[in-house]
Image (cartoon, grey):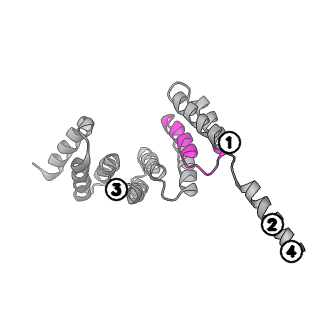
Amino acid sequence: MKLRIFTFFILGLLILTSGLSAEDRTKAQKLNYEGAKQLKADPDKAIGLFEQAMQLDPSVPDYPNNIGVAYLNQKNYIKALSYFQKATKISSNYFRGHYNQGVCYQAMGKNKESVTAYKTALKYNSKSPETFFNLGIVYTRLNKKKSAVKYYKKFLEIAPSSMAKPIEDAKKRIKQMEGK
């Protein structure tokens, strides 16, 4: 009987301590929303709001990812990268975290790492035109023309017409690399 009571006590304690209240979850979502609104005007304020959201609900990968985006916009790639990595630790299949790691590595000139991050991102979203386009850029930098052309062509297959400038750019780069 004592073992049964003790077991129920432990189970109850686990439920109470592991569960996030709906109120905290809602508050975290509101903080994230407010942070997103502040991202361009006041990135430091946005970071603070995202951090509060992350503290309230550490199970949501969007919150550290958004902190990373703020640091990325400030060209603080090392800090940005650490938050994108936090996001993918929370959820290993979190596309945005892997994609943004690729963007960071690309900005830092770490092209091989960028390729790895972008290819991981494609495992979780194989219909991301930006990822294909960026892989084309990175492979061009690595002087791997065949791979660059391959990814630019994949980009052209799925890019919406609203991406007119990158579409034009990809076509131009393919022509240059194929010598046409």
Give how far across and how far down residue 144 sits, in percent: 27, 57
Of the residues tagged 3 and 4, which is closer to the observer?
A: 4
Q: Pointer 4 and pointer 1: residues touching (CB < 8 Å)?
A: no
Up/down of 161 relative to 134, above or below: above
SS class, disc 1: helix
Can residue 86 be seen here? The reply is: yes
SS class, disc 2: helix
Among numbered discs 3 and 4, the one appearing first in the sequence:
4
Marking on residue 126: 3
Q: Pointer 1 and pointer 3: residues touching (CB < 8 Å)?
A: no
Q: Pointer 2 and pointer 1: residues touching (CB < 8 Å)?
A: no
Say what amino acid the circle numbered 4 marks: Leu
Of the residues tagged 2 and 3, which is closer to the observer?
A: 2
The kind of secondary structure the magenta stretch mainly shows is helix
Residue 63 is inside the magenta segment: yes
Residue extent of the magenta highlight? 54-76
Say what amino acid the circle numbered 2 marks: Phe
Q: CA distance from mark 4 to mark 1?
A: 33 Å
Q: Is residue 119 left or right of residue 177?
A: right
Of the residues tagged 1 and 3, which is closer to the observer?
A: 1
Q: Nearer the viewer, residue 47 or 23?
A: 23
Say what amino acid the circle numbered 3 marks: Ser
Among numbered discs 2 and 1, the one appearing first in the sequence:
2
Among numbered discs 4 and 2, the one appearing first in the sequence:
4
Give how far across and how far down residue 122 sits, in percent: 37, 56
Tag 4 residue: 3
SS class, disc 4: helix
Say what amino acid the circle numbered 1 marks: Asp
Q: Nearer the viewer, residue 98 or 142?
A: 98
